[in-house]
Image (cartoon, grey):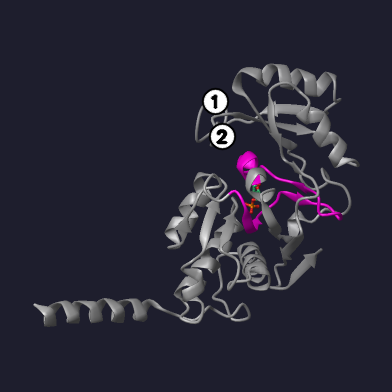
Amino acid sequence: MFRNLNSLVHTSVRRFAAKMTSIPDVKNLPTLHSTLEEAKRVAAYRAVDENLDYANHRVIGVGSGSTVIYVAERLGQYLLDPQFSIYASQFICIPTGFQSKELILTNGLRLGSVEQYPVIDIVFDGADEVDVNLQLIKGGGGCLFQEKLVSTSASKFVVVADYRKRSPKYLGTNWVKGVPIEVVPTSYIRVLNDLKTKLKCKNAVLRQGAPAKAGPVVTDNCNFIIDAHFGEIEHPEKLHQDIKMLVGVVETGLFIDNASKAYFGNPDGSVEMLV
Ligand SMILES: O=C(CO)[C@H](O)[C@H](O)COP(=O)(O)O
């Protein structure tokens, strides 16, 4: 009986050890189906490698979107590397919505919540546009409220993005779909009107779920999203405050003085950093 148990334990240890691999070198990664995906991956991997203090950071925010997929993947690689696994097994990852919760779990990482861990060491998240002062538009994926809750609870917020997200100067230049605004469902008509009449918004629409869903997008918090285009945004802080004052607005996708750094991946495999 004892011999059987012993051999079972040894088999499990051998199986676990067989899965362990060193973290892949960013200079020698397998090709992906597009250079855009490779740009996202290299930005995410470099951001994690250069900012994660694996021996001291415990509570790690994992944002939403297609670039963050590679952040979760990289954190999972730390877990499988015998050199880092002792530290990585202590990481507690805080999601910013349903998608990031899934990313955390599928990469074998430990899931926590912002209610359990209101103080976060570092967060990695994507952005829809980043200006020269590190002000951001976020919420293209509809997760802006939880993203803001997590990023403003973190000591350090590192943006991971591809080259298309870097604004030449003002927000609203590259990202012309509009500033995402999360609103309480019953207030959406009122907010649409106020955006146009009080804030002189050029165009504001309720985000629709079609073709995947008939009717509006419903957020992880059961709210609606309005996309409001203001043209080039010279004063993002003022605009954020003005929108926030409207009755029915839960949060805006303008992230002001929140990010510490941004990593932009290029199609040639290089990465540019903005601090
Ligand atoms: O704010 C977000 C979701 O609400 C995303 O971070 C943003 O849309 C960027 O996504 P991607 O990495 O897919 O370009």
Q: Is residue 217 above or below residue 106?
A: above
Q: Nearer the viewer, residue 193 or 135?
A: 135
Describe residue 204's horizontal placement relative to residue 211 as left or right: right
**Residue occupied by mark 2:** 219
Q: Is any atom of residue 232 visible in this view? A: no
Q: Nearer the viewer, residue 106 or 121?
A: 121
**Residue occupied by mark 1:** 215
Q: Amino acid at mark 1?
A: Gly
Q: CA distance from mark 1 to mark 2?
A: 13 Å
Q: Which residues are magenta?
A: 118-147
SS class, disc 2: loop
Q: Is any atom of residue 235 visible in this view? A: yes
Q: Position of residue 52 (x, y in %)?
A: 63, 69
SS class, disc 1: loop
Q: Amino acid at mark 2?
A: Thr
Q: Is residue 237 above or below residue 151?
A: above
